Image: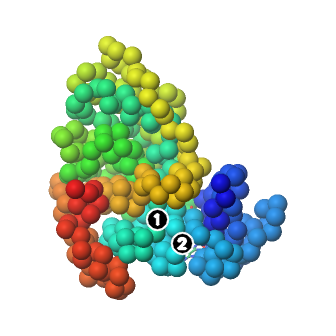
């Protein structure tokens, strides 16, 4: 298999993790590093055994180096611009979560992938976890699911932008759990109710704690309770999970193999062959080679971002928020704001945003 030639875009803290991940696989070849801050790109390239070109524009660098894909690790506000330019230049895109900083921009990206025929996959890194796959396998045998819960309690001192955000926990972290919940239940969200708040001792400006309840298709409730200012008995970064079903329960501490609590043994199903961002990269390369649609493809990923938006809106209004209301409003905004005629045409052809994202 010829390695996929990629340009890394965005060489900040997560970009360096991606640089090392791309370097570590024989299935991809890092041929350039782009960052608006050229010094950052140069520093990232200086850490490599073989020198590679750097630049401040991913598309130009891809043209110069023969890359056919980019890995987009820029800040969320830049995801839309960078990915759109890449797809219209004929490049496939593997991007960091969140797919975009707003739902309308995320919808625009889904339509841009349709208009260009390029692959846009979101690396929702925590989905590629063999333990999560094992938990999903258990869920399949539990019959109807009544409730799924995640508890997430950590006390990180990040400094920087996260401590200034209005909803750091919901926007920057909870998307991983929401995305895993969709995967575990094999069900899409219908409605959200959320309270987000900041405990008096918090070192965050915004709401560092939140409790959200989602009604999922089929009637299961997904409950997420978390805090980023919770010193003492911290949970896994993956959270602590419990599934309660018709025939039993399953639990996962986020770091070790999940446990089935039922009168039958766990089924022997294949688990994820990959994990973390390395997993996302292997899946991206495989999907391009085989022409298959991977988990995390922009359409499939997008409802995880919508869950975040619905939780934030509920927390700000005090009301239960319907996922379709968030989607419909974002779709109208996306249509009104779209400047690219091909993307606008793709958006306009959707029967509805939910149908476009989830298929018939
Ligand atoms: N999956 C995870 O566990 C995880 C963890 C941390 C960060 N992330 C995600 O990774 C992404 C990057 O986060 P980070 O912490 O590395 O941010 P960062 O601020 O450290 O780095 C971002 C870099 O992107 C560059 N950049 C911004 N706009 C650009 C543009 N238009 N073209 C080229 N370069 C541009 C900046 O100059 C900066 O060097 C975010 O989407 C974040 O949510 C994911």
Please tell me how crowded label 1 is: few (under 14), some (14-19), or many (20+) other residues with Cα within 10 Å: many
Identify the image quadrant of the C terminus: bottom left
- The kind of secondary structure element at disc 2 is loop
Q: Residue at x 35, y 82 (%)?
A: 342
- State whether residue 274 is above or below residue 332: above
Q: In the image shown, does 292 or 6 lie closer to the viewer?
A: 292
Q: In the image shown, does 309 or 281 lie closer to the viewer?
A: 281
Q: Residue at x 28, y 21 (%)?
A: 248
Q: Residue at x 42, y 51 (%)?
A: 295
- The kind of secondary structure element at disc 1 is loop
Q: Is residue 62 left or right of residue 172?
A: right
Q: Position of residue 21 (x, y in %)?
A: 66, 53
Taking the image as four quarters, which one is ligand 1 found in?
bottom right
Res 299 → quadrant: bottom left
Q: CA distance from mark 1 to mark 2?
A: 8 Å
Residue ID for mark 2: 91
Tell me how the rendering is colored: rainbow
Q: In the image shown, does 26 or 9 lie closer to the viewer?
A: 26
Q: Say whether residue 78 is visible.
A: no
Residue ID for mark 1: 119
Between discs 1 and 2, the one toward the N terminus:
2
Q: Residue at x 54, y 52 (%)?
A: 286
């Amino acid at each position: 298999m010829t390695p996929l030639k990629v340009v890394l875009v965005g060489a900040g803290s997560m970009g360096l993790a991606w640089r090392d991940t791309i370097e570590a696989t024989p299935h991809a070849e890092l041929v350039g590093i782009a960052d608006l801050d050229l010094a950052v790109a140069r520093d990232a390239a200086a850490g490599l055994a073989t020198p590679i070109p750097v630049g401040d524009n991913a598309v130009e660098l891809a043209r110069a180096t023969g890359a056919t894909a980019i890995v987009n690790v820029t800040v969320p506000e830049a995801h839309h611009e960078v990915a759109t330019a890449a797809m219209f230049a004929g490049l496939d895109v593997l991007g960091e979560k969140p797919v975009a900083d707003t739902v309308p921009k995320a919808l625009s990206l889904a339509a841009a992938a349709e208009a260009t025929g390029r692959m846009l996959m979101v690396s929702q890194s925590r989905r590629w976890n063999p333990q999560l796959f094992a938990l999903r396998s258990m869920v399949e045998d539990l019959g109807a699911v009544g409730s799924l819960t995640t508890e997430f309690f950590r006390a990180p001192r990040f400094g920087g932008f996260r401590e200034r955000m209005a909803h750091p926990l919901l926007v920057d972290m909870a998307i991983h759990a929401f995305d895993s919940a969709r995967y575990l239940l094999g069900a899409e969200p219908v409605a959200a109710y959320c309270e987000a708040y900041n405990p008096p001792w918090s070192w965050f400006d915004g709401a560092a704690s939140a409790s959200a309840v989602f009604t999922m298709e089929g009637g299961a409730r997904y409950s997420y309770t978390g805090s980023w200012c919770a010193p003492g008995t911290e949970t896994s970064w993956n959270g602590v999970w419990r599934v309660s079903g018709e025939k039993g329960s399953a639990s996962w501490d986020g770091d070790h193999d999940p446990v089935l609590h039922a009168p039958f043994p766990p089924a022997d199903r294949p688990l994820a062959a990959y994990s973390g961002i390395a997993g996302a990269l292997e899946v991206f390369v495989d999907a391009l080679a085989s022409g298959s649609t991977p988990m995390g493809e922009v359409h499939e990923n997008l409802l995880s971002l919508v869950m975040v938006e619905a939780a934030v809106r509920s927390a700000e209004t005090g009301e239960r928020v319907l996922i379709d209301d968030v989607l419909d409003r974002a779709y109208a905004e996306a249509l009104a704001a779209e400047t690219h005629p091909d993307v606008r045409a793709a958006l306009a052809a959707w029967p509805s945003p939910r149908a476009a994202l989830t298929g018939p």
